[in-house]
Amino acid sequence: MTTGAAADETIGTARQSPSRGARGALAYWTAQAVSQTGDEVYALAIPLIAYAIAGSASVMAALYAVSMLPHLVFGVAGGAWADRNGKKRMIVTLSLASAAVLGVLALAISGRQQRLPLLFVGVFALSVLTSALLAAFDGALNEVVRPERRIKVISSLESTRTLTVILGPIIAGLLVSVWRGSLPLLIDALSFVLAAAIISTVRFAGVPGRGGDSAYRNLADSIREGLVYLWRTARLRYGVMLSTLNNAALGGFEVLVVYRLRQNLGVSSVVTGAVFASGGAAALLASLVVPRLAGRIGLLRGMCLGLLGLGAAGVLLGVAPDAWVVAVAQASFISSGLVFNVCWRTYRQNHCESTMISRVAGACRGIAYCGATFGSGLCAAMIALGVPVPVYLCAGGAMVFVLGVFSRHLLAARAEDGDGCTAGSP
């Protein structure tokens, strides 16, 4: 692990590159926004296609599990490969490969014999590619976007993701109902091709690797080096711990929003949709505020504020007497999650060596996915064992609230004085 002056020198070299300007930031955001739009169309189209083929809820659940598993492993592996061989080439290559997989799936779905095993293989293959692709995209941020622009770009990406989460399923539902399933997959394939074309026009800073080729004897060593670096860098280790514990405590939140509205409060599906739409609107508003907020109070306090809002949302949903309070809880959960994610991602980008960022980003995502998977399973188990939903929500919310109270002190105690206190801090 490299720390202290050596790390500062490496990061500083990357930041002084003249190649990263407003044009690069705009292209980076556009590429990810286009890809995100296609991904959200795909996210609903695949379970609808699986249901049309098999008519089984268990098959749909199994397909979802298959899509999640690669993120636990291939994120850090893809990050290691990106740090070793160049992020731009990897983004373009993986984007085109993902488009090819989607094209094959589209052909299979449009055929007369729709084979379910091929659907599972295709979904798994695409998840392998996209988990590595996301790590490469995260690593590319430091080579394309200047430090002072990072929080704005990350905030814009989070708001775009929220908007595509709202619009993507609507588009997918209409397309699947009219064109069965092949067209949504082709649209996602096109989004990957466009993202690759946009990224190919961007000039990357091209930060050189540390220690020459001997530092990367093979891919396994690169993966191990990234994991060791994450574990030994206290501020990054505790940051991902906070993210993972939050996911574990409130992993079933949005499922329980539906449960509370439909089962406990007896509201219609239209009202349920309106509640989720209110969460999306709150997130869009938060994305406009968070860059200025973090600039005023600092990234660590922003992470703390996000956790406090997430914890309050859990408790509020647990005690909600009507749909209006549920809507407030949902809005608090989505907007607070955006605040935490933007501040945490920016903090991670600013405090991680540029030669490590893809591996660290992939590992952080994989660990956080483990937390979310565990949280969803814990939620299902607790409810199956007879734990009342309000009790579960209040306990999880209280836990996250406590994390929020102590999070800044936990991170700041392991950083230098003033470290991470502003959005543009190194």
Image (cartoon, rainbow, N blue to C red):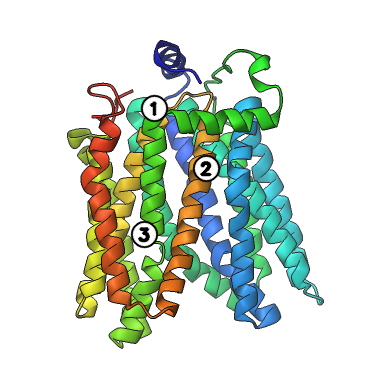
Q: Nearer the viewer, mark 3 or mark 1?
A: 3
Q: Nearer the viewer, mark 2 or mark 3?
A: 3
The residue pinned by badge 1 equals: 351
Q: Circle 2 — which element?
A: helix
Residue at 53% of width from left, 74% of height from top? 173
Whether residue 425 can be seen here: yes
- Residue 233 appears in which quarter of the rendering? top left
Residue at 21% of width from left, 80% of height from top? 322
Amino acid bearing label 3:
Ala
- Disc 3 and disc 1: Cα gap in Å? 26 Å
Q: Position of residue 251 (x, y in %)?
A: 41, 62
Q: Circle 1 — which element?
A: helix
Going from the N terminus, do you reach mark 1 or mark 2 first?
Answer: 2
Going from the N terminus, do you reach mark 3 or mark 1 first?
Answer: 3
Q: Position of residue 27 (x, y in %)?
A: 48, 36
Q: Position of residue 270 (x, y in %)?
A: 35, 82
Residue at 36% of width from left, 59% of height from top? 249
Going from the N terminus, do you reach mark 2 or mark 3 first?
Answer: 2
Is 172 on the left or on the right of 239, as rendered? Answer: right
Vertical placement of residue 83 versus 169, above or below: above
The residue pinned by badge 3 equals: 249
**Alpha-carbon neighbours of circle 3 within 10 Å: few (<14), some, or many (≥20)?**
many
The residue pinned by badge 2 equals: 31
